[in-house]
Image (cartoon, helix red, strand yellow):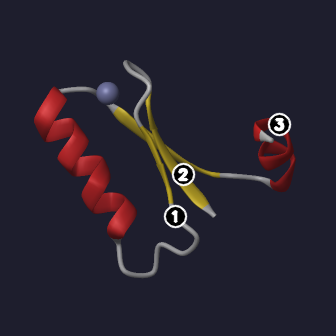
Amino acid sequence: MPIAYCEECDWSRRVEDDADGELNRVMICHHVETGHSVEQRELRESDRELES
Ligand SMILES: [Zn+2]
């Protein structure tokens, strides 16, 4: 489960499966709109527990 997040604001986007490249598109979109640098990483099971 990949997640994209912004280091400069609270923006983030998570997808179950990035097979269609959706995450990459929204990352580019946020960068174009805001000029922020967006990071991407794999969300681990341990990270999900912290959110709940
Ligand atoms: Zn941002």
Relative placement, left or right, of 29 versus 11 is left
Indicate yes or no: mark 2 CB to ligand 1 under 8 Å.
Answer: no
Q: Amino acid at mark 3?
A: Leu
Q: Is 17 above or below relative to 47?
A: below
Earlier sequence position, callout 2 versus callout 1: 2
Q: Amino acid at mark 1?
A: Val
Give the position of the C terminus as an image quadrant. Answer: top right
Give the position of the N terminus as an image quadrant. Answer: bottom right
Say the numbered circle drawn on residue 48: none
**Residue contact between numbered discs 2 and 1, judged by CB atoms under 8 Å:** yes
Task: State the residue at coordinates (83%, 55%).
Answer: 45
| Residue that mark 3 sits on | 50
Residue 17: x and y in percent read 54, 75
**Residue contact between numbered discs 1 and 3, judged by CB atoms under 8 Å:** no
| Residue that mark 2 sits on | 3
Earlier sequence position, callout 1 versus callout 3: 1
Q: Amino acid at mark 2?
A: Ile
Q: Quadrant of ligand 1?
A: top left
Say the numbered circle drawn on residue 15: 1
Earlier sequence position, callout 3 versus callout 2: 2
Q: Considering the numbered disc 1 on the image, is that residue within a helix, a strand or a loop?
A: loop
Q: Is 47 above or below relative to 22?
A: above
Residue 37: x and y in percent read 31, 30
